[in-house]
Image: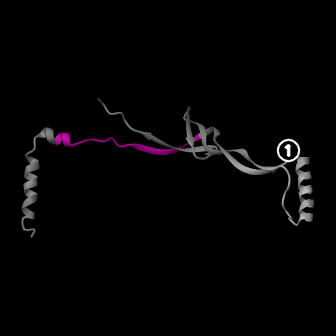
Amino acid sequence: MFRSAPRVLPCLLALAAGLPASAQEAAEVTIPQENVRYDYATVLDARPVYQTLRTTKMERRCGDGPDEGRLARVVGAVKGAFGGQEGEDVGDCRVVPVSREYRRPIAYDVDYVYKGSRYRTRMDRDPGNRLRIRVSITPQPMR
């Protein structure tokens, strides 16, 4: 089945040797190797970035003031005791929307210094006093 396979390799080598020099040079692409190391920078400041969440919840409110609410509960309890309906509030009760606002940190704006230069980045957590950084040096390609 693969009896012709040994003859294919010499044919491919002969074909590659017959390519013009410009085609062989175009196939060679030099990618500069990146020099990477890790070091530590000093953190100058880390400020939290907050997300503000607003929620609305429906709550039952009775009476206009705190005294009226207590009075309505007492009257309701007395009427409930005589009328056989315990635990039922009687009075000016209604369901009203109550808005609440919550703030939570979602990121940190971090200012840091490395070898005399200041930098800023946004991170998902507070890095503390030191920040591990990746230092990469690559030569600029010549034109």
Residue matched to label 1: 64
> Viewer-proximal residue, 107 or 13?
107
Please provide percent x and percent y for residue 78: 93, 60
Residue 59 vertical placement versus 120 (above, below): below
Question: Which image quarter: residue 53?
Answer: top right
Which quadrant does the C terminus fall into? top left
Along the line of sight, which residue is nearer the eye, 105 or 135? 105
Image coordinates of residue 122 in percent, x first then y, are 56, 40
* Quarter where residue 115 is shown: top right
| Horizontal and vertical percent position of residue 74 | 92, 56
Q: Nearer the viewer, residue 102 or 134?
A: 102
- Horizontally, residue 39 falls left or right of residue 53, namely left
Q: Residue at x 6, y 61 (%)?
A: 7
Q: Is residue 119 above or below residue 91?
A: above
Residue type marked 1:
Asp
**Residue in the image at 71% along x and 45% along y:** 100
Give the total number of marks visible in the rendering.
1
Color scheme of the displayed model = one colour
Q: Is residue 77 left or right of residue 18?
A: right
Q: Secondary structure at mark 1?
A: loop
- Image point (14%, 40%), residue name: 23
The residue lying at 85 percent from left, 63 percent from top is 87
Residue 42 is inside the magenta segment: no
Query: Which residue ends up furthest to the top in the rendered image?
Result: 143
Give the magenta range: 24-41
What is the crowding at mark 1: few (fewer than 14 residues within 10 Å), some, or many (at least 20)? few
